[in-house]
Structure formats: C-alpha cells, structure tokens
Image (cartoon, rainbow, N blue to C red):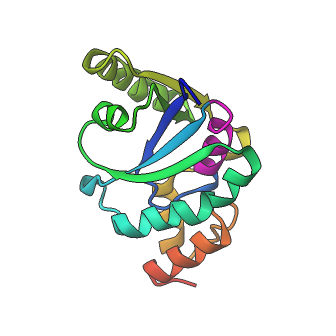
Amino acid sequence: MANKRVGVYPGTFDPVTLGHMDIIRRGLRLVDRLVIGVATNPGKGPVFSLEERIEMVRSEFGPLVKDTGTELQVEPFSGLLVDFATRMDAQLVLRGLRAVADFEYEYQMVGMNAHLNPDVETVFLMASEKYSFIASRLVKEIASLGGDISSFVTPTVAKSLYERVGRK
C-alpha cells in the first residue's frame, strides 16, 4: 500500500495494562501500521526486563491484529522518541491521556518533539472512562501490597506481576 499511515505508541509498559490495551485497540483504527515502542527507561526502575516487557506486549496485543487487520509491530527503543519514530517511518506518535496532569507534561513534549522533527505529529487519545485512573506504577504498588489487580491487567500479566513481586 502506498503512503501507509504509520504510528508509534511509546511507553515503558511495566506492566502493560488494560488502559494501554484500550489506547492501542483504538489507535489501530487510525493507522495502517502501529509500532509499539517499548522504552528502556532505566530511570523508572522497571520490575520487568526490557525483553520481558517486549514479550508481554507481544503476547497481549497479538489478538488485536486479527480484529483490525492493522499491522502491529513491537520494538525496543532508547534515545529520542522522534528519532525512533523516524527510524520506523512513522508520521505520528500516539499518546494516551488520563488526566489534566498528563496533558501538561505531554503538551511540553509535543512542543519539544515538534521542534526536533516537525514532520512527526502527535495524536492524543483520551483514556476511556473505565481506564482513566489506571497507571502501571499504581498497579505495581497494589500488587506488591497483595491487592487485587485483576481489573487493571489481564490474568496473564497479573500472574507475572504477582510472581515478580512475591505476592499471591
């Protein structure tokens, strides 16, 4: 297909949540190919290794491709997001917004990224209401304290996270 619309959805995905899945499901309708960029981001102190997070994302999002017919690719990345987007031939960066606090941070990032590469657009999708409060950081904290995370992640992700943090 000529002039494929390619998007990049970046994140740490530590762990991947139902909120991430919702944004990806909806984002797949906007592009012909969606590249999920799994960031190294050691500053966030991920619970799962980069390789584990990539595999987790691949296993969770595989079924979505069948539903939409959109090409889905999962790739690790480090460095500047706009450089990664350029390497993936992406014209847009897909970002999910949960709250006003997200918007303030993302607004600054859009300006910086547009300055670095004006050919890459950022598209925001508002989190669906039922997922708007989910944050990977909070899911990890709840799991580490033995709480129920079943409404925030898939059963497979919950099992992996509980095993990792030594609960349940």
Residue 133 visible (yes or no): no
The image shows residue 54, relative to residue 131, as above or below, that is below
Q: Nearer the viewer, residue 24 or 17?
A: 24
Q: How many marks?
A: 0
The percent position of residue 139, horizontal first and vertical second, equals: 53, 61
- Across and down, in percent, residue 32 comes to 60, 35
The answer to whether residue 158 of the structure is visible from this angle is yes
Q: Which of these two is toward me, 24 or 109?
A: 24
Q: Which residues are magenta?
A: 19-30
Q: Which residue appears at 62% of the width and 41% of the height?
A: 23
Would you identify the image quadrant in which residue 106 lies?
Answer: top left
Instruction: For the N terminus, give its image quadrant.
Output: top right
Residue under the point 44% across and 60% down: 14
The C terminus: image quadrant:
bottom right
Tell me which residue sits at (65%, 42%) in the image: 70
Towards the viewer: 87 or 12: 87
Quarter holding residue 58: bottom right
Q: Main secondary structure of the magenta part?
A: helix
Magenta-colored stretch includes residue 34: no
Where residue 111 appears, as percent x and y from the top left, is 34, 17
Q: Is residue 46 above or below residue 143?
A: above
Query: Left or right: where does residue 77 sit relative to residue 58?
Result: left
Task: Examine the structure image and report whether residue 24 is included in the region drawn in magenta.
Answer: yes
For residue 15, side relative to residue 113 (left or right): right
Q: Residue at x 61, y 62 (%)?
A: 60
